[in-house]
Image (tube, rainbow, N blue to C red):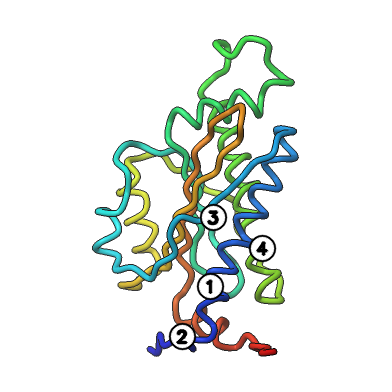
């Protein structure tokens, strides 16, 4: 398996992360009516065995989305529990007057919907950069310690390496934290990146 990336194409990997997170922020801005900002704090090829040491401790709620088209693999959208509660309030504010009456099922559904919306924004950004459509499977709700979720998801691809985007989302009034991790099929991903035309001035 060749995982050599043309050095001139490395900027495209950063561009994919940037465009993807812009899509997420746009979706969040539409939902909240506020200017959401998303920053990519880290982009790495990382050994799956080392991933857990890079993560903040604590449980996460979120969604795992499988890509049905190249570069295949999975996208994870994870929220710390405090942020998940805020998301529930945002998503249900027009439906429920008293948040104390919200059932666990409604709360999970709200987080799942938000996670799916964010994943769609991220994947649409990738599709734009790669110049192709990428369909996704229905999102799967996840709730566990961050390390467990990420390591399990990385293991689904059977690769020793994963492409690791760490991102933070902030919405002024809501202070929502979100993390996005991408685990594409690395061989396909590298082939696609190397296939992008580089135009030099």
Is residue 1 positioned above or below 37 on the image? below
Counting other residues with Cα less than 10 Å from the Cα at mark 4, is it few (<14), some (14-19), or many (20 or more)?
A: many
Nearer-N-terminus badge (4/1): 1
Counting other residues with Cα less than 10 Å from the Cα at mark 2, is it few (<14), some (14-19), or many (20 or more)?
A: some
Tag nearer the camera, 3 or 1: 1
Where residue 201 appears, x then y in whole percent?
70, 89
Give me the disc on residue 5.
2
Q: Are marks 2 and 1 in contact (CB under 8 Å)?
A: yes
4, 71: nearer the viewer: 4
Nearer-N-terminus badge (4/2): 2
192, 44: nearer the viewer: 44
Residue drawn at (57%, 44%) of the image = 115
Give me the disc on residue 125.
4
Residue drawn at (61%, 72%) of the image = 69
Between the C-alphas of marks 2 and 3, the distance is: 25 Å
Is residue 134 positioned above or below 140 on the image? below
Instruction: State the residue position of label 1.
Output: 13
Give me the disc on residue 65.
3
Nearer-N-terminus badge (2/1): 2
Nearer-N-terminus badge (3/1): 1
Image quarter of residue 146: top left
């Amino acid at each position: 398996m060749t995982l050599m990336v043309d050095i001139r194409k490395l900027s495209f990997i950063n561009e994919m992360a940037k465009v993807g997170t812009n899509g997420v922020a746009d979706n969040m801005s539409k939902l909240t009516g506020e200017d959401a900002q998303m920053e990519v704090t880290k982009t790495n090829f990382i050994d799956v065995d080392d991933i857990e040491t890079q993560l903040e401790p604590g449980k996460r709620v979120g969604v795992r989305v499988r890509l049905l088209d190249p570069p295949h693999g999975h996208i994870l959208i994870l929220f710390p529990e405090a942020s998940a509660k805020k998301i529930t309030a945002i998503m249900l504010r027009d439906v429920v007057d008293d948040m104390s009456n919200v059932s666990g099922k409604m709360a999970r559904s709200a987080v799942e919907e938000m996670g799916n919306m964010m994943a769609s924004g991220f994947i649409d950004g990738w599709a734009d950069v790669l110049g192709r459509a990428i369909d996704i499977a229905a999102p799967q709700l996840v709730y566990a310690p961050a390390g467990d979720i990420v390591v399990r998801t990385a293991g689904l691809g059977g690769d020793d390496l994963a492409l690791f985007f760490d991102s933070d989302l902030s919405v002024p009034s809501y202070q929502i934290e979100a993390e996005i991790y991408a685990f594409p099929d690395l061989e396909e991903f590298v082939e696609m990146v190397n296939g992008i035309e580089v135009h030099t001035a």
